Amino acid sequence: MQDRHEIIKNIIKDNKLCTAHDLDHVLRVYNLCKRLAVHEAGVDMDILIPAALLHDIARVIEDEDKSGESDHAVLGAKMASGILERLGYEEGAIERIKHCILAHRFRSGHNPETIEAKILFDADKLDVIGAIGIARSFMVAGQHGEKLFQDIPIEEYIVENVGENGRIKDNSKHGINLEFELKLKKIPQRLYTKKGKEIALRRISYMEEFFRILREEINGEN
């Protein structure tokens, strides 16, 4: 089975991925999945590992779709199915892996029902918070021309620049601190595993301190 995992890794290496969802992100999620799995009972690693490796395989398609209609979780599950079939996975295993991929994002409309899906969901969300989350956010912000910091009340910003579907209307008016207030700080309460929540709370605490210091430095107060 390990050979199949290595083949999947090689497929991911050759796949076109965006900067914030590249192979490094995939491998961090893969490692977090293994860490979280130790603290849960009945985890099937032969389901969890391929799901972790393939969860963002369609991300670049969504990112390049300016209509906002593409869902990389849905597309990724379909793409993963073909890959897994070629590698000889049984139909039952493929369906379980597809569920993990479908349910790994907030807006997919598919809630994680299995322990493997819950672990993947948590691991993927942990990689957008903490120090790594800040680093990734700045990478994305640079791609979209966002400012270093946006000093505007969050309530006012929501009215001005957030659509009904939660998407940002104008990325040039967005900022990492606003992304933190809108979404990232809420992540711990959305997670499923006890260990995932523990890690998330530590990472959010770090981010709160980071943005406090950043605001002070921008205002010449520190």
Image: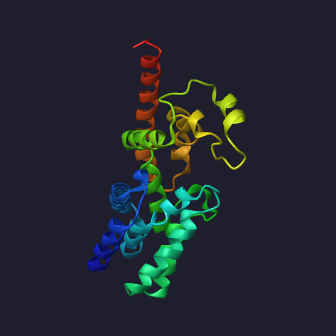
Q: Which of the 4 quarters of the picture holds residue 124?
A: bottom left
Question: Residue 198, percent across and down?
Answer: 42, 46
Visible in this render: residue 164?
Answer: yes
Query: Foreground residue, 153 or 195?
Result: 153
User: Residue at image x 48%, y 39%?
Assistant: 141
Q: Which of the 4 quarters of the picture holds residue 71?
A: bottom right
Visible in this render: residue 113?
Answer: no
User: Residue at image x 56%, y 34%?
Assistant: 178
Query: Foreground residue, 206 or 115?
Result: 206
71 vs 213: above or below: below
User: Residue at image x 32%, y 65%?
Assistant: 13
Q: In this view, does 127 lie to the left or right of 71?
A: left
Question: Residue 45, percent across and down?
Answer: 36, 72
Question: Residue 126, percent across and down?
Answer: 43, 49
Query: Foreground residue, 118 or 54?
Result: 54
Q: In this view, does 142 lie to the left or right of 153?
A: left
User: Residue at image x 37%, y 69%?
Assistant: 49
Question: Residue 72, percent across and down?
Answer: 54, 63
In this view, the residue farthest toward the top is 221
Q: Which color mode does the image show?
A: rainbow
Query: Foreground residue, 110 or 214?
Result: 214
Quarter of the C terminus within the rendering = top left
Quarter of the N terminus within the rendering = bottom left
145 vs 7: above or below: above
Q: In this view, does 129 lie to the left or right of 24?
A: right
Q: How many marks?
A: 0
